[in-house]
Every structure is written in C-alpha cells, then in structure tokens.
Image (cartoon, rainbow, N blue to C red):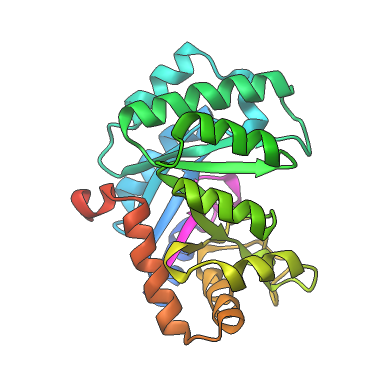
Amino acid sequence: MFVDSHCHLEMESFDEDRDKVVERSLKEGLVYLLTVGTEEQYFKKVAEIIERYDRVYGAVGIHPHSSATFDEKTALTIKQCLTHRKIVGYGEIGLDFFKNYSPREDQIRAFRAQLIIAKTLGFPVIIHSRNAKSETLNMLKEAYGNNATGVIHCYSYDWNTARKLLDMGFYISIPGTITYASAKEQVDVVRNIPLDRLLAETDAPFLTPVPHRGKRNEPSFVKLTVKKISEIKEKDVEEVASAIHDNFLRAFPKIQTGGAK
C-alpha cells in the first residue's frame, strides 16, 4: 500500500519507458502516484498520463524556476487544467532562492498569485521552498493563517520550521535524500514529526535514494524512503506505509471523490 506523493512522469526522462516504469511501480505495491507538472509545456502531457494510467493522479502549477513566465494567460490555462477530474493539487509552486532561475520579485509575484488561485478554488497546494525559509513561512501564513491545505514537498528545513508548518495545517513530504549519510537534519525532522502528518515521495527522476544513487529515480524507489522512515521511527514498514497512504488521501481529498477509471 505504498504511495509516491510527488514525481514527474511527464518529464522527458521517462519518454522511452514510461509504461514499464508505471508497471514496475504497481508490481512493487504502489497504489497511488502523483505526477506534478511544473511548466505550462508539461500540462497537456500530465493530462494524457493521468488518463492513461488508473492509479496516477496529477497536479499543475508554475515552479519558482519558471516564475517569470507566469501571467494572466497562464493563470487561465491552469484554472482550465484544474477542472480535470484527476488533477487533485495545485503545484508545485513556491520560492527557490538557491538557484534563482527567475528573479526573486517574479517568484514572489507568481507564488502569491497562485496561492490565491489555489485557495479560491479549494485546491491543496504543493510547496517548493529552498533557501527561502522565512519568506515562505511569511507568505503561507499571510495566505492561510492556520487553515492551510497542502504539502511541503521535498522537505529540507529544520524541525522548528516543520513545527510551524504543521501548525498551519500542512503535511510534510520526505524525499529519498533521507537515505543519504548527510541527512542528519532530515532524520531529526522525521523522528519528531507525528506519523499522521508525514508523506513520502521520490521527486523522480531526481533525488535518487541509496542504493540507486547516481541512476535515474523512479516511483518504485519510494519504498526505500518509507523503509528509512520506518527505521528512524522504529515502526513496521507496513504501519508507516499505511499511515502515509491515509495521509495522502486526506491531503488530496479529490482522489476519493474522483476515483480511478
């Protein structure tokens, strides 16, 4: 009963063997995958993928790297995409002040506008935040107070920050980097966070977990992340996987009402 709460099956890395990748995931016990379109060029492909595979759902939004492209036309396109019965989240959106592929002012502008759209339409948000801890906290607090709906994707900050995000209402998603020897701060977060607020993800094709590090990541590898979380929390893998499954359905309630084909 495993779930990959965040991957990018629409990306070119999977063009040659997407069917096999999804098939492997199902054989490994995954029951849900969420593929996340981060640029307008991927939105149509996300729709095609979620129509093709029963257990794959989608989300769309403009990633902070592409924030400079966000305008009223893009917003309208996203709103149209959100009407698809298997598009269940808005994202990933947020701030990335590590690479700054888009100017900071464009990132802040696009993030604020997309938070408003997501909140107005009642969609859970998928948040990307890197080297922008205080700015992200402030903007999320401004938008939601303590009534947030959504996920902090690929969590990389400390436990104190995680606690503030939990208080707002967010779920915290842990990627394959938790298997790295350098992941001491992430381990502390996983140890402290309540099991009913955790998710696991691959962010495939990125952030491949040990022992596959250096290869392309894929959704079936989420089992390695769940196994590591289980070790840290000293619980059975089955218990953790079941909790993550239930958390995922609470985080993205449209899945339960939309159902698989």
| Residue at 48% in and 26% down | 114
Q: Does residue 155 lie above or below 85 as drawn?
A: below
Q: Which residues are magenta?
A: 2-17
Instruction: State the image coordinates of residue 135 (x, y, percent, origin top left).
Output: 67, 33
| Residue at 74% in and 22% down | 103
Residue 246 relative to residue 109: left or right:
left
Q: Who is closer to the viewer here, 1 or 143?
A: 143
Is residue 14 within the magenta segment? yes
Q: Is residue 209 visible?
A: no
Name of the residue lying farthest toward the top: 72
| Residue at 28% in and 50% down | 253
For the C terminus, the quadrant is: bottom left
Instruction: State the image coordinates of residue 121 (x, y, percent, origin top left).
Output: 32, 29
Q: Who is closer to the viewer here, 75 or 234?
A: 234
Q: Does residue 52 lie above or below 134 as drawn?
A: below
Instruction: State the image coordinates of residue 241 (x, y, percent, origin top left).
Output: 43, 75
Instruction: State the image coordinates of residue 13 (x, y, percent, origin top left).
Output: 61, 51
For the N terminus, the quadrant is: bottom left
Q: Who is closer to the viewer here, 61 or 164?
A: 164
Is residue 26 within the magenta segment? no
| Residue at 62% in and 36% down | 136
Q: Quadrant of residue 16?
A: bottom right
Residue 115 relative to residue 215: left or right:
left
Q: Is residue 35 visible?
A: yes
Q: Who is closer to the viewer here, 77 or 244?
A: 244
Q: Does residue 106 lie above or below 238 as drawn?
A: above
Q: How many marks?
A: 0
